Image (cartoon, rainbow, N blue to C red):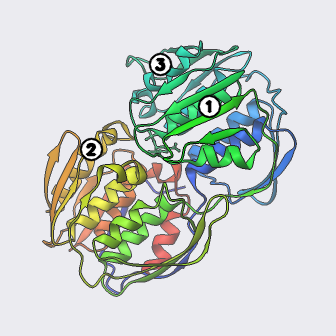
Amino acid sequence: MSSDTISVSRAVNGLRGTITVPGDKSISHRVAILGALARGSMQVSNYLCSEDCLNTLRAMQQLGAAVTPTDSPQNFILMGTSMQPVAPARDIDCGNSGTGMRLMAGVLAALPFASRMYGDPSLSKRPMKRIIDPLGQMGARLTACGEKPGCAPLAIEGGKLTPIRYELPMASAQVKSAVLLAGMLTEGTTAVHQPAITRDHTERLFAHFGIPCRVSADGLDIEVDGPAVPVAKDIVVPGDISSAAFWLVAATVVPGSEVCLRHVGLNPTRDAVITVLRRMGADISLSNVQREGEPYGDITVRTAAHLRGTVVEKHEIPNLIDEIPVLAVAAAFAEGDTVIRNAAELRVKESDRIATTVGNLRSMGATVQEFEDGMVITGGAPLHGAVMDSYHDHRIAMGFLMAGLNADGETTLLNCANINTSYPGFEEHLRTLTR
Ligand code: S3P
């Protein structure tokens, strides 16, 4: 469990050492969902045992999937339901996870029973209309019952759906995946068109589980033929590049650093944080890269000789959306301006990440201009420690602890417990690398 308040000061000896970050969050959710519907059993290795993904796994157990740990909690045998899930006996708790709730909505909407999902106060404020609309077009009966209109809890009256061709109004892998998962359970061909490339874990896992799915050459159009039953097949979840990103930034900015991150996912729809940091002057090298299925490899990062600002391109935004808070921290240490625009989606994450990132950067003394869809950071001046809120947002907590490792004085982050939603063991890694 993460502490609720975490303090750091300058890492005077740099960050040094080798760590293995926990499994990928996006892939873990999808493995639990597809494995739970699958025919047969599979060995899942390196599942992310964070609160978010454990909630999804527990939900799948409520639907009848069986989980038998092997040598450690992140390695288990998942026995699927052969597409014969049972109605959950209780309401499904999605905790803090928008991904869990939105992906499961796609599945539950197409199953022949009623269910209900709820989440914590942050999740209960996040928009669900974005999945209710397309699933509604498929004939799903989904009601947002939250105090805030269009928000969780979600009441689902599951049943037979009809396929659609859906034009995504925003670049969202969660919405894309909710429609594709519903499509997998629906007779006919369900198609989505996305305005930009978003993480393609669902499509890759469809291939892994033998679900008939086609992706256009430009990656923007995806079709799935249903109904299809996933066929269980062993899987190893690679490390989460979004968790690795914290150390990529810290080791880049803190003098005297050299960190090796082992077995990190390098899916090309997720690796723009490396591209952008390298463009800024970061010293990042890859080794032992495997390109089959979900690509992964080892990453070595050393302190950058010189870091300069950059413009994050529009097409890069969905690829590094979760890394923007920590990228903004890197930008504060880079000479010149870093421009991050076209990122209004940040406003509806676990916190309003434009407001929380800009506010915290300013409290450390950085110069930042806020825009409705992003920010411009003018970096290069030293940062000072501060007491800051993480707004119960794991990525804000970890991002600003990284800033504190290169700031004068002490940096304290409040309300950090949600680090556990994505990165169990974070504090131990922090101690290991700054020892
Ligand atoms: C995710 C997609 C992204 C990302 C989230 C995980 C996924 O959200 O921010 O952390 O696993 O599909 P959006 O689809 O809302 O962009």
Q: Residue at x 39, y 34 (%)?
A: 170
Lower position in the chain sequence, tag 1 or tag 3: 1
Q: Residue at x 61, y 43 (%)?
A: 202
Q: Amino acid at mark 3?
A: Asp
**Residue with the mark numbered 1:** 104
Picture quadrant where residue 9 is located:
bottom left
Q: Residue at x 67, y 55 (%)?
A: 47
Q: Is residue 75 left or right of residue 358?
A: right
Q: Is residue 120 above or below residue 331?
A: above
Residue 335, image x and y in percent? 16, 72
**Residue with the mark numbered 2:** 342
Q: Are marks 2 and 3 in contact (CB under 8 Å)?
A: no
Residue 370 visible, this angle: yes
**Kind of element beneath mark 2:** loop
Which of label 2 and label 1 is nearer to you? 2
Q: Amino acid at mark 2?
A: Asn
Q: Is residue 70 left or right of residue 282?
A: right
In the drawing, what numbered circle is on residue 133? Answer: 3
Lower position in the chain sequence, tag 2 or tag 1: 1
